Image (tube, grey):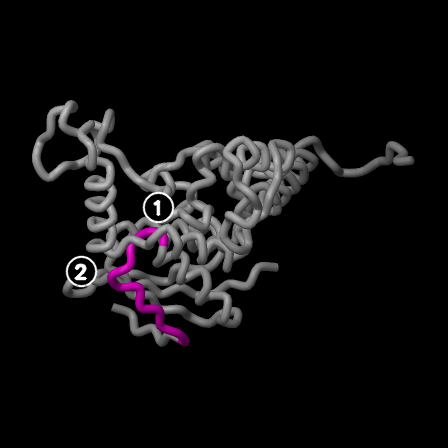
Amino acid sequence: MPDIQEHRLLDARGLLCPMPVVKAGKEIKSLADGEILKILATDRGSIVDFPAWADDTGNELMEWHEQEGGVFVFFIKKVEED
Amino acid sequence: MLEAQETNITEETVRTIVREEIERAFKKDPAKKRMAIVASKGSLDWAYPPLILATAGAAAGMEVSVFHTFYGLNAIHKDYEKLLKVSPVANPGMPMPVPMPDIVTALPGMTSFATGMMKGMFKKKNVATISELTEVALEMDVNLIACQMTMDVFGYEEKDFIEGVQFGGAAAFLSEARKSHVTLFV
């Protein structure tokens, strides 16, 4: 598992669609270009939602995996739009 | 005027340039970032889909307008808590604790029972409430628009709606919709 150091952590555990994506959308605004947002989520739909969201927003989903206890961890790098 | 000159531009080169330009234009297509939704239903269950899609779209950087018309006005009414109910009548899709014949679902009190049950289910699963969704939507600059015509028909006034709601008609919706790739009627 790659060791990625995040600049900010979003704990979206326990939240259901659309709240994890909504919170991520707010959180990523406060990051600078190239900074990394780590997200913890338990909503199984987020496995599909975060890649789609990253693709739509132009941010980069660097890596995601499932932790013990059904927690999904996502690393998203902010890519400033030109 | 471009004069025909002796150049090395082949048809293939022209095609490549055109293709690249089209691809670039598609990426910049502003309609990709716009969504226009009609919310026309006034029950608790149907109040969710437009607001969920609107907030998810706004979170992905889209400019979103939700046009609340007819019973869809309920979700943005100040009394949304009382107005939004769910009825098990003619709703065979609704999961019930025990199988129920249609005639029983029509008994007095069944609507408030079903509404309470659904709210309890949502709360237990930690689904966002309607007020949380409208709050988040407004915070993210989603345009929540109340249909003026149906407001007049139902006898609603502007002050009956939650803070931040805008007012408009069919032309206002269409003006948004024609610039949006995502248009939905809920």
Describe residue B20's horizontal placement relative to residue A48 as left or right.
right
Q: Is residue B78 above or below residue B179?
A: below
Residue at screen point 57% across, 59% down: A81
Q: Point out which mark residue A70 bears.
A: 2
Kindly identify the amino acid type of the residue bearing the numbered disc 2.
Gly
Which residue is labeled 1 in the image?
Answer: B82
State the CA–CA distance, disc 1 to disc 2.
36 Å
- Residue A65 appears anywhere in the view: no
Q: Mark 1 near mark 2, Cβ–Cβ under 8 Å?
A: no
Question: In this view of the protein, which residue sits in the foreground, B123 or A18?
Answer: B123
Relative image position of residue B133 (x, y in whole percent): 40, 53
* Image quadrant containing the C terminus of chain B: top left
Mark 1 falls within which chain?
A: B
Q: Quadrant of residue B49?
A: top left
Q: The magenta stretch spans which residues?
A: A7-18
Q: Is residue B38 above or below residue A43?
A: above
Residue at screen point 47% across, 54% down: B137
